[in-house]
Amino acid sequence: MKTQTDIDISNLRANLNGQVIGSDDAGYDEARRVFFTGFDRRPAAIVHAGDASDVARVVSLARETGSELAVRSGGHSRAGHGTSDGGIVLDLSAMNAVDIDVDGRAAWAQTGVTAGDYTRTTGKRGLTTGLGDTASVGLGGITLVGGMGFLVRKHGLTIDDVLAAEVVTADGKLLDVDERAHPDLFWAIRGGGGNFGIVTRLRLRLHEIDRVVGGLLVLPARADVIAGLVAAAAEAPDELSIIANVLKKAPPLPFIRPEHRGKPVVMAQMVYAGEAAAGEKAIAPLRALATPLADLVRPMRYPEMYAASEAHHPAFSLGTNLLLDELSAGGAETILARLETATAAVTAVQLRILGGAMARIADGATAFGHRRAKLMVNISAMDPRVDNRAEHEAWAAELAEALSGGVTTPAYAGFLGEEGKDGVRRAYPPATLNRLAQVKRQYDPDNLFHLNLNIAPEMRKG
């Protein structure tokens, strides 16, 4: 890896349309930050790319100089992949244009746009693409690993709506890819992450979704409530998608009464993408699980799901995720008992009920490896401090082992941290991983794009 002295900042500026920030420039400390502030790294240069030609030039520079290359759209990587010590950070956030083809029900979007801005832009036409649940996440990062959010049961993963892409490969070429042009690369970028190139634009299918029944339902965190929520959500119509966070401590939010703050709660975000009366009927079993501590679920325009302010950035989000067929008997009790022992400032176990449209796509149609999973459990310990990291990691690992029964489980690539080859093998079944490694050898044989859940060119799983 090259150090700062190996990169000529002034020459780099002269050859790019976007902005280049070096360590001596004002704004450097802000520009090098990623979402999780514990990754306090000092890149030699941060390039805010202005267009795809900038991306191609930076890729060529990194290849020619041997500089480490970190690619960032929203900077939310749990493993800190959007930054580097001594390398080049390619920041795509200025590439955020969205062009809507109303008649064709599709949009071309640059991958630096955030999920919230994309949804607000398309929502003005009563159209949308299912992304994640956080407004500030970058389109590129969330899409390439799958994209699992408020419409996952209704319309599947984000990658199921990818129609085409523009990709800068390791040789600096800009390729147009779709089912006919470079079909192997098109298959790989739909679930295989940023291993194969830098996606600068995506053509995404748009769905006619304007008004939904959605919002936040807060329930007391009891074992019967957690188990009942998972069961009721699994039996609900595909129009209803739910993301529920079981928190050790209810935050001091204005809509939560003081006597409930600091106590265990279930904060369930949900969207019913259909007619309002049917949505109220579908959500009724969830409201009946217990007297709600807060009920903000109502008819709304879909972009309002991304309107809430986001919490302050923690140093880390330590943990892992599991893709399961079901929440085991006693699983809810295990979650509550283990949350009680956690010492991080914020600890949460997120439950995403899957199925529906996501499961109806054929295995192997995309590089997403676990279509038939019915439940994702995302374990997270977040803290503003950088110390006690090992303690929080151990807590998360023990909870994961307890919920999995000690068996290695599949995982969602988007919520894995620094899990190395074990994480890669959990994210991709053997046949998928072998095919991904083959595509990697073709498009990035020297592993230039390695700051990701890395699929090395030589990687195999038998």
Image (cartoon, helix red, strand yellow):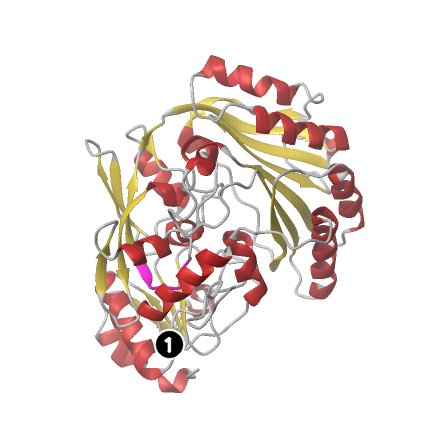
| Residue 348 x, y percent position in the rendering | 67, 45
Q: How many numbered marks does the figure carry?
A: 1
In the rendered image of this protein, does residue 287 appear above or below residue 38? above
| Residue 78 x, y percent position in the rendering | 55, 58
Query: The N terminus appears in which quarter of the rendering?
Result: bottom left
Q: In the visual, does 275 lie left or right of 221? A: left
Q: In the visual, does 444 lie left or right of 404? A: left
Q: Quadrant of residue 257?
A: top right
82 vs 120, nearest the viewer: 82
In the rendered image of this protein, does residue 278 appear above or below residue 272? above
Q: Amino acid at mark 1?
A: Asp
297 vs 187, nearest the viewer: 187
Q: Quadrant of residue 374?
A: top right
Mark 1 neighbour class, 10 Å CA radius: few under 14, some 14 to 19, many 20 or more: some
Picture residue at 74% right of the left edge, 40% below the top: 331
- Which segment did they paint magenta? 193-199
The residue at the far bottom in this view is 5
Name the main secondary structure of what is drawn in magenta.
Answer: loop
Q: Is residue 390 magenta?
A: no
Q: Which residue is mark 1?
A: 446
409 vs 221, nearest the viewer: 409
The residue at the far top in this view is 277
Mark yes or no: residue 21 visible. yes
Picture residue at 26% right of the left edge, 61% below the top: 50
Q: Quadrant of residue 3?
A: bottom left
In the rendered image of this protein, does residue 148 appear above or below residue 208? below
| Residue 84 x, y percent position in the rendering | 47, 72
Q: In the visual, does 330 lie left or right of 429? A: right
